[in-house]
Image (cartoon, rainbow, N blue to C red):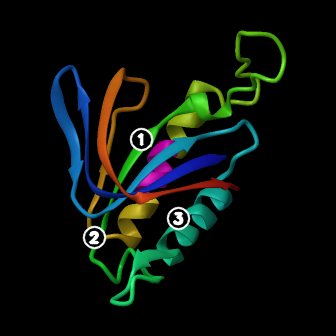
Amino acid sequence: MKIVLQRVNSAHVLVKNEIVGKIQTGYVVLLGIAQSDTHEKIDKAVQKIKNLRIFPDDDGKTNLSIDDVGGALLVVSQFTLLADARKGNRPSFIDAGSPQLANELYEYFIKTAKLHFANVQSGVFGASMQVTLTNDGPFTILLEM
């Protein structure tokens, strides 16, 4: 599993020119599911995201969690995070989870996140989406679980 976690001031995702998910302060979670991913890995990833302290405190130090700032999540499935472009000019997606597995674990990620966060929004699995965000910092972290 690969996750690109972006701290944002605001973000939204469009599908067919309609907003399907929108947040203010929080994280955009770009989620790439690999063949080897499991429910247990999803559980660990959600806990890691919940416990990360990457929001600034009053002194400007990254010392606050998403809960501390009342933040939200916008979760977007992105299988292209599993691209392997080391050879040739056309990326291989051989390590990406099958569409069935990826959809199941994407939905499980959202369900699990809703148990831990007050506001969880999402994109649409497999859809062509346009994600707009204002990255705060910019602050972006790559998590590999």
Seen at 70% across and 22% down, the residue is: 93
Q: Is residue 65 magenta?
A: no
Seen at 40% across and 48% down, the residue is: 75
Count of numbered labels shown in the rendering: 3
Of the numbered discs 1 and 3, the one sitting upstream in the chain is 3
Q: Which residue is mark 2?
A: 118
The Cα atoms of the two marked residues, 1 and 3, are separated by 14 Å
Residue 38 tag number: none
State whether residue 56 is above or below residue 9.
below
Q: Which residue is mark 1?
A: 76
| Identity of the residue furthest to the left in this view | 18
Of the numbered discs 3 and 2, the one sitting upstream in the chain is 3
Seen at 49% across and 51% down, the residue is: 108
Q: Give the amino acid type for the residue marked by disc 2 in the picture.
A: Ala
Looking at the image, which is closer to me, 132 or 110?
A: 132
The 10 Å Cα crowd at callout 3, few under 14, some 14 to 19, many 20 or more, is some
Q: Which residues are magenta?
A: 106-111
Residue 46 tag number: 3
User: Residue 87 sits in which quadrant?
Assistant: top right
Looking at the image, which is closer to me, 68 or 108?
A: 68
Which element type, helix, strand or loop, lies under badge 3?
Answer: helix
User: Residue 41 sits in which quadrant?
Assistant: bottom right
